[in-house]
């Protein structure tokens, strides 16, 4: 969920910076939010891999690609969530 929120913040940053010609303080707020969320998610990913909550592929997608394009981490998160739901026994999907 945080990954999706991070993608929305990043989209807001891109919109402010490029489409709206960088209005302040909105560009600063979106930029700072993007940076802080990315740092928090990277630290959380390190711990989650250590405790085997997520796999290394998802952690790398979030931590390495998240600083320049958090959409990769969100897409990977959604892909793995879908695969996990498909693998659960007794779950009927349409």
Image: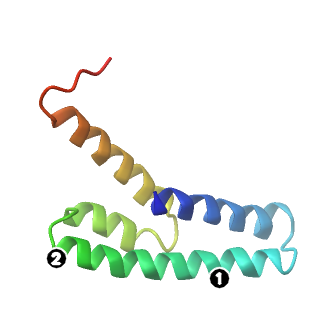
Left or right of 81? Residue 8 is right
Spatial distance from mark 2 to mark 1, Cα to Cα?
Answer: 28 Å
Residue underneath mark 1: 32
Which quarter of the rendering shows the C terminus? top left
**For the point 47% across and 63% down, which residue is it?**
2
Report the residue that reaches farthest toward the left.
89
Q: Indicate the colouring scheme.
A: rainbow
Residue nearest the viewer, comparing 49 with 64:
49
- Binning the other alpha carbons within 10 Å of mark 2 as few (below 14), some (14 to 19) or many (20 upward) gives few
Q: Are marks 2 and 1 in contact (CB under 8 Å)?
A: no
Q: Is residue 44 left or right of residue 30?
A: left
Give the crowd class for mark 1: few <14, some 14-19, many >=20 residues within 10 Å.
some
Query: For the residue labelled by badge 1, is the local secondary structure a helix, a strand or a loop?
Result: helix
The residue lying at 80 percent from left, 74 percent from top is 26
Q: Nearer the viewer, residue 93 or 78?
A: 93
Q: Is residue 13 above or below residue 86?
A: below
Name the secondary structure under disc 2.
helix
Q: Which residue is mark 2?
A: 50
- The residue positioned 25% from the left and 37% from the top of the image is 85
Residue extending farthest top: 94
Residue 1 located left or right of residue 92:
right
Q: Residue at x 51, y 56 (%)?
A: 4
Q: Residue 22 falls in which quadrant of the image?
A: bottom right
């Amino acid at each position: 969920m945080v990954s999706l929120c991070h993608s929305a913040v990043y989209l807001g940053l891109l919109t402010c910076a490029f489409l709206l010609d960088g209005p302040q303080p909105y560009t600063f707020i979106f930029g700072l939010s993007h940076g802080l969320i990315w740092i928090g998610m990277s630290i959380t990913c390190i711990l989650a891999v250590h405790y085997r909550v997520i796999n290394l592929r998802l952690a790398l997608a979030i931590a390495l690609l998240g600083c320049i394009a958090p959409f990769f981490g969100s897409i990977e998160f959604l892909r793995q969530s879908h695969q996990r739901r498909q693998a659960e026994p007794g779950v009927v999907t349409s």
